[in-house]
């Protein structure tokens, strides 16, 4: 395994060093500083806000009974990921000249539609589960 | 274990049985493949803008850039949710105790910090760029490229460091693999490697397979509802797609409008001429454009932002003008626009694209819209949209 690790680490370290070198030498001082802020804020936002909120939601969900929780967790995960992509679109909706044909949709409405679909699928799957458990409970 | 008891009482403890190296390795494999695709297609795009003289871009297949850049953006967008789930799966590792136990451990954590922050910024700025949103002062293309080296380099480094864990994670079954907590497996008395065969962790609600299915459903929904801006038959599903080709003038979106290029007057001037410079220089007037026999070609317009659309162009083959000016297929052709200033008010053609390119007067059966480059624009196959210079003013054959 060691030779594979070296074969990955050497080009990896070289590419990383090259990228950092280019950033440091090619970007002007102010731009480099702004990029450093972005890099720091990205980690702080993820590790300090997004991840704890997700973990906290997970903890709250443990109060729900396991059978429905399964589908609630799945729907919240899929819906949350879709929402992450939709939010910037909603923020930029209708900001550009017409002939660019960009950001012309009702992204808020479309997000609600997708979240509604996600919830509906989870409900239907949960419904099947309830019916199946009920039948198994009755026995043949 | 000593390290566990010596840490502060308030230190967080993670116990969700959903987290496991088996889950992380599978998510990491997907994220790694996506970043590799983005890196390769990104470098191909960079080459379109800065080709070596001795290796010019091919003209065929005409759709090549449409495919590679569509893939670049679609993959990058899909990587955003994938990366978030991947980071969720390893969040406990942020709370190792003690935070740094040796120089090697410190360097490893530093490399993970570089990987996480560069990957988050790379994906965020890349996505915002496709929304024509630039809330940063630096030049996007070069910084995106340099950050690309940082991301792909730190991924390779990360894979090298985690190779034993990856091997375990990919071989282990989802149902019974060790739970990933803030305690490293080699110090965890409950890990398989320390406790022998242990019963699978209980997952009464969502289990690990369900987690991957739900995450995959979210990513799949995002891809399906955004890809229509590249794969035009799926345009109808594009609930979250940025571009809608059909809403553009003549069925094709533009990025630079005539107004923002400040050519509203110059492009509509009755005395417009095209100046052709070469061994035998000449000029073309608007009347000349009408009288020259035109040909029709199907070339896509493919933007670096990932959107693209097939279109039918009609106009004069560039090679005819080049020959008339005393050049041939091996000439270098520089074209420039009426647009004053701007990084893309000129472009260069060499090699196969010189023979394949068209100076278009018509788009989808109509005289070019002003926003599409009236009275005359360049269109060539396998070429980023912004390099198909609009509102042509001058051609230099050398």
Image (spheres, rainbow, N blue to C red):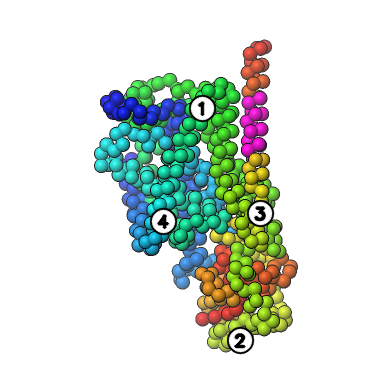
Contact, CB < 8 Å: mark 4 with mark 2?
A: no
Residue B128 inside the magenta-drawn segment: no
**Residue A104: mark in rendering:** 3
Q: Which residue: 59% across, 28% down? A: A71
Secondary structure at numbered mark 2: strand
Task: Identify the residue position indicated by label 1 in the image.
Answer: A60
Secondary structure at numbered mark 3: loop
Q: Chain of mark 4?
A: A
Horizontal relation, residue B69 to residue A131: left or right: left
Q: Is residue B119 above or below residue B373?
A: above
Q: Which residue: 42% across, 47% down? A: A41
Task: Identify the residue position indicated by label 2 in the image.
Answer: B282
**Residue A34: mark in rendering:** 4
Observer-side mark, 1 or 2, equals: 1
- Circles 4 and 3 on the same chain: yes
Q: N-terminal of the two: label 4 or label 3?
A: 4
Q: Which stretch did the figure color magenta?
A: A114-127
Q: How many marks?
A: 4
- Let me know if residue B242 appears in the view: yes
Instruction: Specify the quadrant that holds the N terminus of chain B.
Output: top left
Q: N-terminal of the two: label 4 or label 1?
A: 4
Q: Chain of mark 1?
A: A
């Amino acid at each position: 395994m060691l030779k594979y690790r070296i074969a990955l680490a050497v080009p990896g370290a070289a590419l990383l060093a090259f990228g950092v070198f280019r950033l440091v030498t090619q970007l002007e001082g102010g731009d480099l500083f702004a990029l450093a802020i972005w890099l720091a804020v990205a980690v702080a936002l993820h590790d300090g806000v997004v991840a704890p909120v997700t973990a906290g939601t997970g903890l709250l969900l443990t109060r729900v009974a396991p059978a429905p929780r399964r589908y609630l967790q799945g729907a919240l995960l899929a819906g949350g990921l879709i929402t992450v992509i939709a939010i910037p679109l909603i923020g930029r909706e209708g900001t550009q000249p017409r002939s660019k044909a960009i950001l012309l949709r009702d992204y808020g409405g479309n997000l609600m539609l997708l979240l509604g679909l996600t919830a509906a699928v989870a409900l239907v799957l949960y419904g099947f589960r309830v019916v199946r458990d009920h039948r198994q409970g009755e026995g043949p | 274990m000593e390290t566990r008891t010596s840490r502060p009482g308030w230190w967080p403890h993670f116990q969700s049985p959903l987290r496991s190296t088996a889950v992380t390795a599978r998510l990491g494999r997907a994220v790694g493949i996506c970043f590799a695709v983005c890196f390769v297609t990104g470098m191909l795009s960079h080459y379109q803008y800065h080709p070596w003289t001795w290796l010019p871009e091919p003209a065929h297949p005409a759709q090549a850039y449409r495919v590679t850049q569509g893939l670049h953006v679609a993959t990058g967008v899909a990587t955003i949710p994938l990366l978030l789930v991947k980071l969720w799966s390893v969040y406990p590792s942020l709370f190792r105790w003690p935070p740094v136990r040796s120089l090697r451990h410190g360097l490893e954590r530093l490399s993970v910090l570089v990987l996480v922050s560069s990957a988050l910024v790379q994906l965020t700025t890349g996505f915002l760029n496709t929304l024509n949103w630039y809330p940063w002062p630096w030049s996007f293309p070069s910084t995106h490229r340099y950050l690309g080296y940082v991301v792909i380099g730190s991924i390779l480094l990360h894979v090298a460091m985690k190779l034993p864990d990856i091997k375990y994670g990919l071989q282990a079954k989802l149902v019974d693999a060790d739970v990933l907590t803030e305690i490293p497996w080699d110090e965890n008395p409950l890990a398989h490697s320390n406790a022998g065969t242990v019963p699978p962790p209980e997952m009464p609600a969502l289990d690990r397979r369900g987690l991957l299915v739900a995450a995959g459903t979210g990513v799949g929904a995002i891809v399906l509802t955004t890809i229509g801006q590249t794969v035009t038959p799926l345009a109808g599903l594009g609930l979250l797609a940025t571009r809608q080709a059909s809403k553009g003038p003549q069925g094709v979106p533009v990025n630079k409008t005539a107004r923002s290029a400040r050519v509203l007057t110059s492009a509509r001037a009755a005395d417009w001429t095209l100046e052709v410079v070469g061994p035998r220089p000449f000029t073309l007037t608007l009347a000349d454009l009408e009288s020259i026999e035109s040909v029709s070609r199907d070339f896509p317009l493919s933007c670096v932002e990932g959107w693209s659309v097939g279109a039918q162009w009609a106009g004069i083959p560039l090679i005819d003008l080049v020959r008339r000016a005393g050049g041939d297929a091996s000439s270098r052709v520089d074209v420039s626009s009426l647009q004053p200033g701007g990084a893309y008010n000129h472009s260069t053609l060499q090699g196969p694209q010189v023979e394949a390119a068209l100076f278009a007067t018509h788009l989808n059966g109509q005289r070019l819209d002003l926003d599409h480059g009236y009275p005359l624009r360049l269109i060539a196959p396998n070429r980023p949209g912004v390099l198909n210079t609009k509102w042509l003013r001058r051609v230099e054959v050398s």
